[in-house]
Image: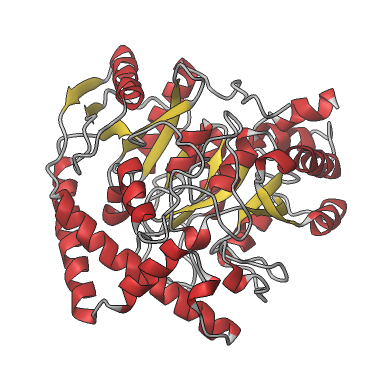
Amino acid sequence: MAKLDELAFLDATAQAEMVRRREVAALELVEAAIERIERLNPVLNAVVTPMYEQARAAAAGKLPKGPFTGVPFLLKDMIASYAGVRMTLGTSFLHDFVPNRDSELVVRLKRAGLIIVGKTNAPELGLLPTTEPRQFGPSRNPWDTNRTTGGSSGGSAVAVAAGMVPMAHANDGGGSIRIPASCCGLFGLKPTRARNPLGPAFGDIMNGLIVEHAVTRTVRDSAALLDATSGPDVGDPYWAPPAERPFLKEVGAAPGRLCIAFATKAATGVPVHADCVNAVHDAAALCAELGHEVVEVAPTVDAELVNRAFMTLWSAGCTATIEGAALTIGRMPTQDQFEPPTWAIYEMGRKQTASAYLLALTMLQAVSRKIAQFFVDYDMWLTPTLAEPPLPLGAFDSPPEDAMHAQRRAAAFAPFTPICNVTGQPAMSVPLFWNADGLPIGVHFVGRFGDEATLFRLAAQLEAARPWANRHPPVSA
C-alpha cells in the first residue's frame, strides 16, 4: 500500500518516466489508481462513471509511445466524448446517452499514451462554479469535505488533489478549470481560445467562451499535456496562433523581467475576502522578490455591460445545449428533468433574439479590444482567482421562489475568471497560498492572447520558489 500511495503523488511526467524505465508497469499504475478511487470515492464522490475494464484492457495491450504512456487519467463528464461510454453532462436528461465516437481531444489523449480510468463529476451542464449536481450528488473538497470543490471541473480537481490520478481533463467557459484548481490547491491553466480542438462535434461553443485542457499537480505536466493535445483539427473554424516551440521547453526557461499589473478589487464591486486579498499581495511580493516589476493597476471594465452580454451568450448556450441534446436523443426536455437554476437559464435563453445575441457579441469584442490594449504595457495581470475561500456545500442552493439565486451567488464568488473567456486570453490559477483554516487560495495570472509560453515560464519560476506539489489534503491517505 505504501508504495502505491507514493506512486499516486508523483506527477504524470514522473509516472511516465517510471514506465519507460520499466520500474513500474502501466497495469500497476492503473490498478493503483483504481484502488485509490475505490477507497476515497465513497467520501469525495469525484468519479461518477468508472471505466476500469477498458483501462485494464488498454494497460495490458500495446500502448502508443507518447509522453504519458501508461499514466492513468480521468475525463470530465462533459464535452469530451469517449465512444461506448455514457456522457451525461451532469443531468438526468442524458443519463443513458452513449456517444458512438471519440472526440478529437480524446483521440489525442489516447495517442499521448494516457489510460482513461473513468469520468468525473460536474454540475448540471457545467453552469455553476460548484460541483453539486442533483444527478450524482456533491463532490467534496479533500481539504475540508464540508466545502465546495469549485466547478465545473470539480470532480477532476478532487481526483487529482486526492491522488487518484496525477492530472485530469477539465474545460472552462467562465473559470471552470481555474476555479476548482483554486479550491483544491492545484495548477489550472486555461489555454488561449481554440488552442485545443472541440471537434468533431463542435467548431466552437458559445462563440469561443469554452476551452479544453486539464487540472494538474505540476506546471510541467500542464505544459507537456498541452503539447500533446493542442493544434488545429481538420475543419476547425479558427485556431490559436502557433507556439514558437513546445510549451514544455518554457518550463524552466527564464521569464525575463516581467511587468506585472495586480489588483485585488473586482470590477463588479462585489466584496473580496481578506484571505483572497492577502493571497494576491503575497504573490505580488514574491514576484517582486524574483525580480519582476509589480504595479497596482487594472484595466477599466464596464462590468455591468460585460455581465449582461455574457449572460446573453451563456443563457443562449444553455438553451442550445438542451435543445441540441433533445435532438440527439429524440426526447423533448421537460422542466422536471432539470434543476431549477438550469431551467431558469434555459428559459432566459429561449427569450433571446438573434439580434440581441449578435449585439452582445459585438459588445464583448469591443471589451476584448480594450483589454488587449492594456496588455501592450503589461505582460501579466494578477488578481485573486476567487473572491472567497471555498464555500460550504449548499451555498449555491436556490430557494423554490428564486431559481436565479445560484447564478447571482456564482457571480459574487467568481468575478475575476470569466473575462478571460470573453477575451480568449490564457490564464492560470496558481496554488501559492493557504489560509489559516488550511484551505487553498489560488491566485490568477492573465497573459497576452496566444502567449501561454510566458505563463508557463512564470509559473515554473513560482513553483520552484514556493513548491506546492508536496502539500497533500487530509482526505488523501
The residue positioned farthest toward the front in the image shown: 401
Q: What residue sits 43% from the left and 42% below the top?
A: 178
Q: Is residue 84 above or below residue 432?
A: below
Q: Is residue 310 above or below residue 337?
A: above
Q: Quadrant of residue 96?
A: bottom right
Q: Is residue 244 left or right of residue 167?
A: left
Q: Is residue 419 left or right of residue 95?
A: left
**Residue 206 screen position, x and y as percent:** 36, 67
Q: What residue sits 74% from the left and 54% below the top?
A: 64
Q: How is the image coloured?
A: secondary structure
Q: Is residue 249 visible?
A: no
**Residue 41 screen position, x and y as percent:** 72, 42
Q: Is residue 155 left or right of residue 461?
A: right
The residue positioned farthest toward the top in the image shown: 289
**Residue 474 screen position, x and y as percent:** 65, 24
Q: What residue sits 59% from the left and 82% below the top?
A: 329
Q: Quadrant of the N terminus?
A: top right
Q: Is residue 399 visible?
A: yes
Q: Is residue 246 left or right of residue 355?
A: right
Residue situated in front as seen by the camera: 119 or 453:
119
Residue situated in front as seen by the camera: 157 or 287:
157
**Residue 275 screen position, x and y as percent:** 36, 23
Q: Quadrant of the C terminus?
A: top right
Figure label count: 0
Q: Is residue 409 above or below residue 472?
A: below
Q: Is residue 141 above or below residue 98?
A: above
